[in-house]
Image (spheres, grey):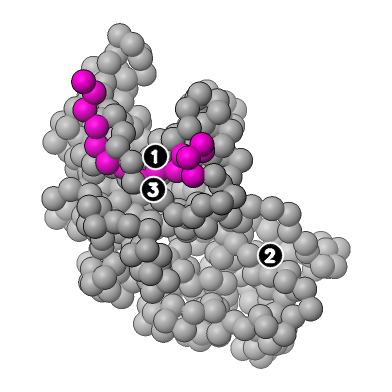
């Protein structure tokens, strides 16, 4: 009889993308390694997950406004209907394939986090060191089964050994999204620059922490949520602006009050760098309009569907530099993230735990307590949540 464990999932047949919301707890077979049946198990591991993070991508799946085609197409290709969700984690290696120790110097008992993008290693991009835009990538919790379960199977090449003496386990579970912020903040030179952060959710808040130490001269945080703006101010934003989109003619129109305020703060020039981290059409247009001629627009937020950019020719005429950021640079971004988190003097790790995670108060949810109603309530209150999977 096959042993099973509970997991948080989406089922293509049972749940319906159009008529459901949330994650659904189901029993799944406990993962195993069998190299005779699956040769790739030789380079895979079984992890016992300790903590698992919930990010903006997971919220997009929860609300069914992101990754529909990727989830549905991958499930159909695999010939199954259930996707195990989640991709941010820290855990312990409890079993490994025969080639893992030799190829990756990973051993049973190692505490590990890991990148959620599983790359092929063979395409042009992978061969020239651009794995983050791999032609054949899969993504944990989206196009591959993820980590919202006590035991999971993951390719060993994706793992990053962590040291809990340097980075506490709750923070180590967030290497993946913190790495997103590192990638975004290093897409252009921000030293001495005025930077607008559109969207002060978890990646925006991580970015504000980093911008301060990467040398930004002025950091402006923009969001609809006053609590998020208060956190942004605590974490290093010099100025915050509350977004109110109620008076616009079109949903995609830029918010003129915000643009005018930014122009006032930058003496009519516009910011040197805009970071768009929310993913809404209007936020993309805000970031474009708020940026000075010759400045940089960093696009990271993701939503499905078509976008409208009014007067698009002005983007070209103004000589804007557009950077589309996906994932992390594997593993150079991870190394920067580890150094920033391990440096106790900069306060980044303490600020993430005490301010963003609110010292774990109401933000860390035992997986056995999960239900859709509880989680919906907590998502409305907090920009960052963790599941506690195992002790």
Tell me the SS state at disc 3. Answer: strand
Tell me the SS state at disc 2. Answer: helix
Q: Which residue is mark 1?
A: 84
Q: Which residue is mark 3?
A: 24
Mark 3 → mark 1, Cα distance in angstroms: 9 Å
**Position of 4 relative to 223 (above/below):** above
Task: Judge depth for marks 2 and 3 and give the one in front.
Answer: 3
User: Which circle marks residue 27 in the picture?
Assistant: none
Q: Earlier in the sequence, mark 2 or mark 1?
A: 1
Is the residue marked by circle 1 packed among few (<14), some (14-19), or many (20+) residues within 10 Å? Answer: many
Q: Residue 89 in the image: state x and y as whole percent.
A: 30, 48
| Residue 13 visible (yes or no) | yes
Q: Residue 81 in the image: state x and y as whole percent.
A: 48, 32
- Between 113 and 210, which is closer to the camera in this rendering? 113
Residue sitting at x 49%, y 48%: 327
Q: Residue 128 in the image: state x and y as whole percent.
A: 55, 32
Task: Judge depth for marks 3 and 1 and give the one in front.
Answer: 3
Mark 2 → mark 3, Cα distance in angstroms: 29 Å
Q: Earlier in the sequence, mark 2 or mark 3?
A: 3
| Residue 329 visible (yes or no) | no
**Position of 250 relative to 367 (above/below):** below
Q: Which residue is mark 2?
A: 281
- Is residue 297 toward the left or the right of residue 142 in the image? right
Residue sitting at x 25%, y 53%: 367
Q: Quadrant of the N terminus?
A: top left
Magenta span:
1-15
Q: Earlier in the sequence, mark 3 or mark 1?
A: 3
């Amino acid at each position: 009889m096959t042993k099973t464990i509970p997991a948080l999932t989406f089922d293509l047949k049972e749940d319906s993308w159009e008529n459901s919301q949330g994650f659904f707890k189901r029993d799944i077979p406990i993962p195993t390694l069998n190299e005779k049946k699956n040769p790739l198990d030789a380079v895979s591991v079984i992890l016992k997950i300790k903590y698992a993070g919930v990010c903006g991508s997971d919220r997009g799946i929860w609300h069914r406004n992101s990754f529909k085609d990727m989830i549905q197409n991958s499930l159909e290709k695999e010939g199954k209907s259930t996707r195990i969700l989640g991709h941010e984690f820290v855990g312990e290696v409890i079993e490994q394939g025969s080639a893992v120790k030799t190829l990756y110097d990973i051993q049973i008992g190692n505490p590990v986090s890991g990148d959620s993008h599983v790359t092929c290693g063979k395409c042009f991009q992978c061969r020239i060191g651009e794995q983050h835009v791999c032609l054949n990538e899969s993504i944990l919790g989206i196009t591959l089964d993820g980590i919202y379960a006590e035991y999971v199977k993951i390719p060993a090449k994706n793992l990053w050994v962590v040291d809990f003496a340097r980075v506490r386990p709750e923070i180590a579970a967030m290497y993946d999204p913190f790495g997103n912020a590192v990638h975004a903040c290093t897409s252009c030179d921000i030293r001495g620059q005025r930077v607008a952060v559109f969207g002060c959710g978890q990646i925006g808040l991580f970015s504000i922490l980093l911008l301060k130490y990467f040398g930004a001269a002025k950091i402006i945080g923009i969001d609809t949520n006053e609590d998020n703006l208060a956190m942004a101010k605590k974490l290093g934003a010099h100025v915050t602006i509350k977004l109110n989109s109620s008076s616009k003619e079109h949903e995609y129109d830029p918010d003129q009050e915000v643009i005018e305020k930014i122009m006032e703060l930058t003496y009519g020039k516009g910011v040197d760098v805009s970071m768009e981290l929310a993913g809404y059409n209007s936020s993309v247009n805000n970031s474009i309009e708020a940026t000075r001629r010759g400045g940089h627009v960093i696009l990271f937020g993701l939503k499905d569907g078509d976008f409208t950019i009014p007067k698009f020719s002005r983007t070209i005429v103004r000589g804007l530099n557009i950077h589309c950021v996906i994932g992390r640079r594997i593993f150079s971004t991870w190394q920067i993230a580890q150094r920033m988190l391990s440096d106790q003097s900069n306060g980044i790790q303490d600020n993430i735990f005490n301010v963003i995670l609110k010292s774990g108060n109401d933000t860390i949810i035992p997986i056995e307590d999960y239900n859709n109603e509880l989680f919906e309530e907590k998502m409305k209150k907090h920009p960052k949540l963790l599941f506690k999977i195992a002790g």
